[in-house]
Image (cartoon, rainbow, N blue to C red):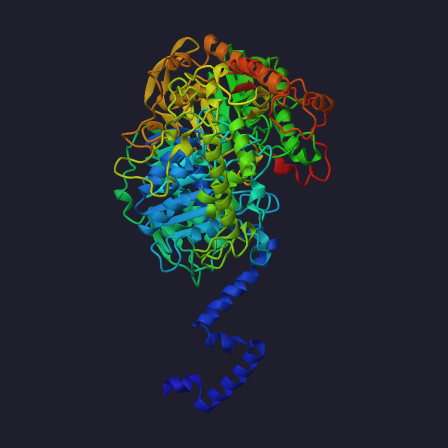
Amino acid sequence: MATELAAGGPAQNRKHEHKKSTSEKLKHPIREIREKLANSSLHEHLHHEKNKIGKFKNLINPQHRHDEAHEKACDDKRTNICLSHRFESFFPERDGNNIKWYVDGRDYFWAVSVALEKAKETIYIADWWLSPELFLRRPPAYNQEWRLDQILKRRAEAGVKIYVIVYREVEAALTCNSAHTKHALQALCPEGSPGHGNINIMRHPDHNVLENAADMTFYWAHHEKCIVIDYEIAFIGGLDLCFGRWDYHQHSLADMHPEGVANEIWPGQDFNNNRVMDFKNVQDWKQNELTKAEHGRMPWHDVAMGVVGPCVYDIAEHFVLRWNFVKRDKYKRDKRYDWIELQGRQGQDEDLVGVQRPKFPVGEYVVHPLTPLTSKPIVDRGTVHAQIVRSSADWSSGILTEHSIQNAYSEIIRNAQHYVYIENQFFITATGDQQSPIHNTIGRAIVDAVVRAAKEGRKFRIIIIIPAVPGFAGDLRDNAALGTRAIMDYQYKSICRGEHSIFEQIRKEEVDPNQHIFFFNLRSYDRLNRTAAEKKIEKEAGLPYQELQRAQAEEVMGEGIHGTNDPEGGRDSHMGSRRDQNGTAQESEDQKHSRDMKKKFEEARNKVEKEGTGGDGNVSAYANADGELDGNINGGHFNGSNPNASSEESNTNSPPRGKAYTRAQSSFTVAHHAMARTGSVAEVKWDGDPEDEINNWIQEELYVHAKLLIADDRIVVCGSSNLNDRSQLGYHDSELSIVMEDKKTVQTTMNGQPYEAGWHATSLRRYLWREHLGLLPPQDLDASDDPNAQPPGDDSPNDVWEWDESWKQVEDPLSDELWEMWTSRATKNTEVFRHLFHADPDDHVKTFDDYNAFLPAKGVKPGHIFDRFMPPADARKKLEQVKGHLVWMPLDFLKDADMAERGLQVNSWTESVYT
């Protein structure tokens, strides 16, 4: 009763409540409804919809991820961590890593295939582009079980959880087709099948204006390339798991096989030349295909690392941060995607990896690794001291800008004592604040290092290898190539043009830059195997070779050609009709057409062979017309059996191998003659008219895609980061790299003096230089017995070829003898490519008028011999002088022309895209 009196009588209270409730209802007409729905699913739905609409507020609040108290606290925590580490990286320096290098795609992809096949718990993959139909082992017809999507399917069916993040491209500008990547991977394990739900793929950034208007990013890309398997092994470097990247040391351009297309190395869209035709997302996939009868591919040079040790955890942590950020940014209300908690970053530190606890969480919270972190063998695994560095920011991972890659490059270059060796896809940098729109200052570190060495009287060199031309399609004389020329213009202005260029800043200090800094490109030659026999077969079949090429691609890359039905509702509308993707066993029109084409060619080939045009027996890929092997090359993939199958197993998906697949007169490629122990290219036989042969010699730039720095034979930086603003500033493209210094040393020489080098750095540098100089032999396709193509581990160190005499030839990076070999081979190779092919760019081309006189008339296929009347023997004699792939970079190219006129394509709004 006392309580009632104190609170007022019942009648009075009811009257008061009635007045209050009426007043409240007038003020908040939906409060009653909200209270009734407070714990209902409808309320949760309304909450999510309100937040979707609320994201438009972020248009006027660019700091919306960093303005709340808990966000500021997390930023402060990250900042303090970065300030406590070298290069201001979030990640610490770690001892005890076992790190293995991989040079070119053959070794890297084979090692990745082995490691993926052994996955037991989780696989993380972050890529700029991922092609599900990529073959990790070659030739594809005999290695169909080693196609990337098939490996992932097997592991998902075995219970492995697979997480993939790919860059979602702006379709109007790029053709990497992440929609197909997503649909194809999600289609691997549909509902009701083993592995369903075990493959999860995210694309980012979001381009949906209704969902994410404030955070759409059109200019910048996710550029990292990394793989983490079971928190025990990681891969990091420059190679995406995508078309166009697989290559070996001889860097062949040709892939035409009259003896049988089952021997093709690069099927379908994987045979690509970005300088001639870019990948295209068109409804008819055939438009995205070069004919191998007329064109060579663009060869690809790259470098990557395999890691076992404590840095595996750091690479995984970066992936988890990105996964949780994309979950927050794009999939927060999508139950298909879980939050990942990371052992070691839980509780108060879970915000460091982007874990959020919204009021109504959608998706589970899953702890990784799936087994105790303490059980992972990543401690004291090797002798390499290493540190992860990155370019990352608000748009890419929800953090304040980190540019520890730029910090690492600048500090390592500035502190170098003997040499700096760089391989990179681009070279755009500034020496200060006077070269807008270029802002990264790695160029200043180069100037400082050179000037200091000169004033101290030290021999010091900076050797840089970049592509001759950025890998974009088009004749550089055309207006359509303005963007490509703009990139080249920024590169030349970074290097040697203008008072603020590196060269001029060094000259300003009365030092000659030509004594210290040297730029090179790489280039390869080959011969198309369009022989008399092939022409007879085409004539008999009434069809061009390209139809056979398409038929073979149809057989081994069907899904990649026609697209995929995604069981979650998506469909590759850009890659075929619904009939092509109907998911039934019925044969599509394209499939039937391809089968018919292949049958016609087989019938024509058999008829021509019976008439005596074919070869005389089983001939190796590298055999001459007499069936003798050139040097020590093993052409085993033509020996009538599957070289990658053990005696206990065979590839049931492989086509039968008979005479039709093993008879060849001319070699399908002669590119290996630029390498060691291969015999003379002057004596290579040609089956047909000499005039045809001269028309079939081709050349192309060897595209440098590596992102590598080696200094003083002691320290290495490798990863995804280009040397330009996009990669180095931190708030543009996202990147991930690793800095490595081996505590295991080897006694060697530097400038003729005794020197203690790091094993990892010196072995990698020596291997690369021998490849570029042509001192290594070419590689066979079968890498099963090659230690350099196996995952990192205690039992598989790199085979550095230290037993070969070439090991000592490249020992001292500053020796006069080695420098003479390096520069003389670059000079001779440059001269041969100039005289035979008029290869561009070239120092003799200083204006566009010079350009028109230097190149053949527009419309003539690029890359062929300029003088079509030259005797083939003369051409071979000149090509015999080419050793390796090294050529000089033409620093005078178009120096008297306006390379990139400012206008609609290049202006203050767009210039940062090119830098």
Relative to 820, residue 856 above or below: below
Relative to 234, residue 777 above or below: above
User: Is residue 805 at least partly visible in the picture?
Assistant: yes
Question: Residue 176 at what x, y percent from top left?
Answer: 53, 43
Which residue in the rendered view is the most extreme toward the bottom?
Answer: 11
Which residue in the rendered view is the most extreme toward the front?
Answer: 611
Image quarter hosting the C terminus:
top right
User: Is residue 464 toward the left or the right of residue 108 in the image?
Assistant: right
Image quarter hosting the N terminus:
bottom left
Question: Residue 391 at what x, y percent from top left?
Answer: 50, 38
In the image shown, does 649 or 233 lie closer to the viewer?
649
User: Is residue 258 at least partly visible in the picture?
Assistant: no
In the image shown, does 661 or 860 lie closer to the viewer?
661
In the image shown, does 233 or 86 lie closer to the viewer?
233
Q: Quadrant of residue 830?
A: top right
Q: At x 65% / y 35%, what residue is drawn?
A: 483
User: Is residue 156 toward the left or the right of residue 474 in the image?
Assistant: left
Question: Residue 44 at what x, y percent from top left?
Answer: 46, 68
In the image shown, does 251 or 307 lie closer to the viewer?
251
Q: At x 52% / y 16%, what residue is drawn?
A: 882
Instruction: Tally the numbered discs.
Output: 0
Q: At x 50% / y 66%, what residue is drawn?
A: 47
Question: Residue 493 at what x, y percent from top left?
Answer: 64, 25
Q: Quadrant of residue 651?
A: top left
